[in-house]
Image (cartoon, rainbow, N blue to C red):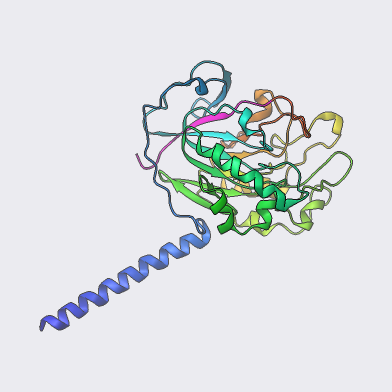
Amino acid sequence: MPYSIFFLKVLVCYFCTSTLRAFRFEHMSERVYLNVEPASLEVNNTLESTDKSKNFLYVDLDSRKAFETNSILTPRPEGKVRFVAISDTHTVENQLSIPPGDVLIHAGDVTWKNEDAAGKVGELGPLNAWMSNQPCARRILIGGNHDKCLDKMNNTAVREVLSSCNYLQDEGIEIQDLKIYGSPISLPYAKGKVSPNDAFTRSSELDERVNGDVEIDERITRIPEGIDVLVTHGPPFAHLDDPPAEWNLGNVGSPHLAERVGVVHPKVHIFGHVHGRERIEQRVEFSSDGIVYINAASVKNFAKPFGEVFKPIVFDMPSKAL
């Protein structure tokens, strides 16, 4: 066989194989990892203990127990990835003390009110600087119903401003083969009225608590199966989702989201949106089907002054890559 024909066949085979691989990657990207490159992580099993490693709520996924402690955070077990979860910081993130970890997750509501959304962009620079200074190798952030500035910006612009974070908007990222999916979906609510803080919401969602027959939000149906950690701004219905009793609102989470979570069955579901939940049993739920629900809302009150700032929530998850 002439060498020219031989090399031509090799070239054709290489092209076909490369095309097939690219197609598979693009197909996967459309389903799970839109616009976000899989992230590598230098896992450090000797995270140093510092004063910032005090004051946290630890969730043990193995024993299915949660406890608060003021002691120094013990080193992360070998072969696991340490997550630190916060949410609803509303510009007071500097009051938080973040312990060392591998992945810091912020479940939305980084700004305060939606009025003058353009002006709120100025709040993102200090937030980005704060996130970059936290002792975690990776930082993941989603928007919330107070973050109109993020809702009005395209994702490219958001990622330029929040350059220290992996910003997720109905998409996911893979770290140490752990699949993390983030969405800003939530149902807005307020005492005696519809909340004007309606970023990332859809009109049909406003009535979902009253009429469960409304059309399901397509962003909920897009949440994929096979994920390890789900991050949404709003909670699923009947899971750590009831505001203070004096508001007389009952559960304000999304029934459609609750149904979808039951189908995709993540190991951990992190959210915020509902403030005032300070006791351990109000912040962490170990469900009978094995899912661990975490309400990571970081401030107590619903208006300034926000009052008490709650401890970050820490958990260790076995890496699939180690």
Q: Nearer the viewer, residue 236 or 3?
A: 3
Q: How many marks?
A: 0
For residue 45, side relative to residue 317 (left or right): left
Q: Nearer the viewer, residue 101 or 220?
A: 101
Q: Residue furthest right?
A: 192
Of residues 3 and 110, the one nearer the viewer is: 110
Find residue 166 and report its horizontal and vertical position in percent. Answer: 52, 48
Question: In x, y percent, where is residue 170?
Answer: 59, 54
Nearest the camera: 63 or 295? Answer: 295
Q: Does residue 278 appear anywhere in the picture? A: yes
Q: Name the residue located 86 percent from the left edge and 38 percent from the top edge.
A: 191
Q: Quadrant of residue 124?
A: top right
Left or right side of 123 for 319: left
On-image quarter of the N terminus: bottom left
When the figure is inspected, residue 207 is found, relative to residue 1, above or below; the finding is: above
Task: Using the rendered view, name the quadrant where residue 37 is placed.
Answer: bottom left
* Side of 126 where 237 appears, left or right: right
Residue 224 appearing in the image: no
**Percent from the top left, x then y, of residue 21?**
36, 65
Q: Is residue 308 above or below residue 3?
A: above
State the extent of the magenta-drawn residues as a range. Answer: 309-322
Residue 241: x percent and y percent? 73, 36
- Queried whether the magenta region covers residue 276, the answer comes back as no
Q: Residue at x 53, y 44 (%)?
A: 140
- Which quadrant is the C terminus positioned in? top left
Seen at 11% across and 80% down, the residue is: 3
